[in-house]
Amino acid sequence: MASNNVVFTCLWSLAVIGCAARSSCSIKNDDSVHDKKQLSGNGDLQSKQVPPKLGFRPWPKIQNKASSKDTLAESKSFEGSSPFIDMQYHMGPVLSPRIQVYITWYGNWKAEDQAIIKDFLLSISSPSDLPSVQKWWSTVTLYTDQTGRNITGSVNIAGEHLDQYSHGDSLTRLSVQEVLRSALTESNGTLPINSHGGLYLILTAEDVVMQDFCRAVCGFHYFTFPSIVGYTLPYAWIGDSGKQCPEVCAYPFAIPAYMGATKPMKAPNGNIGVDGMISVIGHELAEISSNPLINAWYAGQDPTAPTEIADLCEGMYGSGAGGSYPGSVQTDGSGSSFNANGINNRKYLVQWVWDPNLNACSGPNAVN
Ligand SMILES: *[C@@H]1O[C@H](CO)[C@@H](O)[C@H](O)[C@H]1NC(C)=O
Ligand SMILES: *[C@@H]1O[C@H](CO)[C@@H](O)[C@H](O)[C@H]1NC(C)=O
């Protein structure tokens, strides 16, 4: 294992679409990366604090290494439980109050595309036929804070703000906070400041470029800095990758050329970019709820590169998932793939998340 450690760490940080603090590939030496803590005391693997699982997403970096059998082989399924994942609670808050989502639609958005996303968010707390989005979220509500309160099962859309490119069509990790500041506090700001369950989503249209988009991130979450926004509020950005890199951020609705024979799945709402966003939105919501201030639930000892509850299961949509195989999912009458039903007869494909009780990835369509 030792000779793989550097490559491993590098890919690990790239694999984090929900990366809280860092997204770029950084190579550290073993001493700074691996904690000395012995999880169970026998063998080399247990002494590594970096979790041995890579969620799968076909980042461009992987392409360069696609010929190296080691790289893809490292993407093992963690559908089976793993004693090597040490998902820990670090005493910070989780989103236990009712979640009030405030959406900033950045750029040109079509109402029909907004409806796909809004129906997904509203499906989290509405019953639908199984397997459902609500059932998918029930894995997230298994996480609690130090007072024993669970993450809420109640998610509401509490406000929307339209932003026609106030900061141009190319954003950075910092300028996205300025977009949020405009939405909250400037003269035409339309969103309230809500630090009791407020969750701010900035969703960018397919022509908007974001720093590291497609190369290392499809979405990210963090909290706003008082120095920029005036408040500490949890937020997430997710971009529509339909025009820029569907084969990365909307995988498996689009497939990179180097993956040759693999056939793309048909997107359940007929929009590759937006259907691809759904799973990334789900990923970010799960992580922001369990780690809103980056001091609650994550694995690994390095809070600047936390491995959060959705990171471990990225690319897993059904039983048997592993590596580039998304797992077994249903298809509807038109051949579209999905693993969760939502309101208004919607169907969605949303990645699984880490179940703290099973110590494994789980989802609404898990075969027990
Ligand atoms: C709250 O979390 C505990 C611990 O994971 C779990 O047993 C319980 O079922 C959860 N409650 C809800 C409503 O999810
Ligand atoms: C605020 O909105 C109004 C109309 O909605 C517009 O005329 C005005 O220019 C806007 N002001 C700013 C600062 O964006």
Image: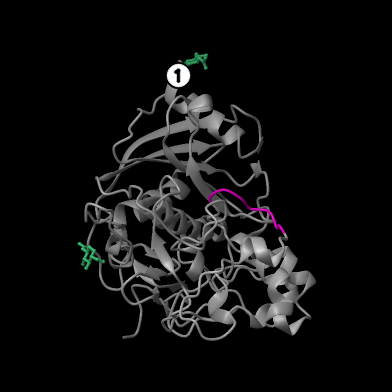
On whether residue 350 falls in the magenta region, the answer is: no
Residue stretch in magenta: 20-26
Q: Quadrant of the N terminus?
A: bottom right
What colour scheme has been applied to the protein in the rendered image?
A: one colour
Spot occupied by residue 37 in the image (x, y as percentages of width and height): 51, 70
- 145 or 216, nearer to the observer: 145
Q: Is residue 203 above or below residue 287?
A: above
> Can residue 218 be seen at all in this image of the molecule?
yes
Could you tell me what secondary structure mostly forms the magenta stretch?
A: loop
Spot occupied by residue 282 in the image (x, y as percentages of width and height): 43, 58
For ligand 2, tell me if the residue under mark 1 lies within 8 Å: yes
> Along the horizontal axis of the image, is 254 left or right of 67?
left
- 211 or 117, nearer to the observer: 211
Location of mark 1 (residue): 188
Spot occupied by residue 355 in the image (x, y as percentages of width and height): 36, 71
> Along the horizontal axis of the image, is 209 left or right of 54?
right
Crowd band around label 1 with a 10 angstrom C-alpha radius: few (<14), some (14–19), many (20+): few
